Image (cartoon, rainbow, N blue to C red):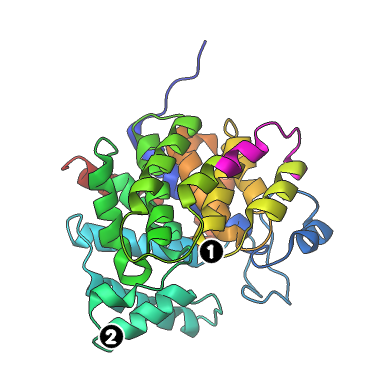
Amino acid sequence: MSPVSPSLHSRATGALYGLALGDALGMPTQMLSRPQITARYGPVLTGFHPAAPDHPLAAGMPAGAITDDTEQALLLARLLLDGGGAVDAEELARRLVAWEDDMRTRGSLDLLGPSTKRAVEQVLAGIPLDEVGRYGTTNGAAMRIAPVGIAVPSADPVALVDRVVEASRLTHNTGVALAGAAAVAAAVSTGLDGASVPEAVEAAVGAARLGAERGHWVAAADVAERIVWATGLVRELPTATEVCERVYALVGTSLATQESVPAALAVLTACQDDPWQGVLLAASVGGDCDTIAAIAGAIAGACHGVEAFPSDARATLDRVNKLDLDTTATALLALRGRK
């Protein structure tokens, strides 16, 4: 008997839980090298860990704690809900500044990324919105875009990319960053509409090609072509360790959109039938692996539903972070139903 297809609500909730689970798993490993991760945690993580006392960003954070990836995604979700599905760029800037101030108050060093920080400072100084994001090439737009994928159906890819641009242009108004964000949003949205992981990856490639035509041009590798290449690199690898090593060495795991988004989709392709293994593996690849795992988890959850992630891991996430992801998913689905 074939498994029962998860409901739309399960897929939407799964996208948010997958994002947060990947983020929390990658919290202690973010910005460490692959050899450092292997030495401390083994070839592939098996669960949540607290951050080491000497961690450059997350020292003192408990096992299961989320980072800026989930917090900014939920910030964007609240902005979408407050705006009836629209994103006001100036309000986004204000909320990002308030979020960073709150993070500093909590003693966190995990603050705004370089592209987002530069753009927010410029818009608050009065520089026109169309100019402030013209140098944003890092993965901040892609890491927080999943709520747009939940709120906007996949049937009209151009309309979906329009919404991605609206939500991202403040900080990441470049073809490469918009391509990466469009890829993630399309994969999530297509997953909600019932797509398998390979179908979601195909949708990501198409949306990346559309996104690359938007915003300011910068010299960067093509995100769509790198997704095709990266997913092909891992398809025949027999072990998770080999997938990690291949992604780390060849695809790259930096903050650059053209590395981290293809890396997430490569890991997802290698673990397309096992979302939990996918986020564990993504959190083990090194570099910006909390973001890579968050992206992979959001897409995996959208394709498989929330029940595909272990209930004890979800319970730990809820207990440590006091998140209400189910309510947020329900509200975002109400926006999706209005399109």
Residue situated in front as seen by the camera: 26 or 289? 289
* Residue kind at label 2, given as amino acid type: Leu
Q: Amino acid at mark 1?
A: Ala
Relative height, residue 147 to residue 309 (above, below): below
Where does residue 72 sit, x and y in percent of width and height?
Answer: 41, 65
Which residue of the protein is positioned furthest toward the bottom in this rendering?
125
Residue 232, picture quadrant: top right
Give the residue at x 54% y 59%: 291
Foreground mark, 1 or 2, reads: 1
Q: Position of 212 compared to 332: left or right? A: right
**Is 239 displayed left or right of 152 in the figure?**
right
Location of residue 324 (image quadrant) = bottom left
Farthest residue in the right direction? Answer: 39
Please say if 283 is above or below 7. below
Magenta-drawn segment: 229-241
The residue to which callout 1 is attached is 256
Q: How far apart are the alpha carbons under marks 1 and 2?
A: 25 Å
Identify the element where label 2 is drawn: helix
Q: Which residue is mark 2?
A: 124
Where residue 148 appears, as percent x and y from the top left, is 31, 51
Q: Earlier in the sequence, mark 1 or mark 2?
A: 2
Mark 1 Cα shell of 10 Å, populated few (<14), some (14-19), many (≥20): some
Q: How far across and how far down the image is residue 168, in percent? A: 33, 63
Give 161 or 28, whichever is nearer the viewer: 161
Q: Is residue 231 magenta?
A: yes
| Residue 149 included in the magenta stretch of the image | no
Do callouts 1 and 2 mark residues in contact (Cβ within 8 Å)? Answer: no
Which numbered tag is attached to residue 235?
A: none
Is any part of residue 283 visible from this angle?
Answer: yes
Residue 10 image position (x, y, % from top left): 39, 36
In the image, what residue occupies the spot 64% across and 57% down? Answer: 252
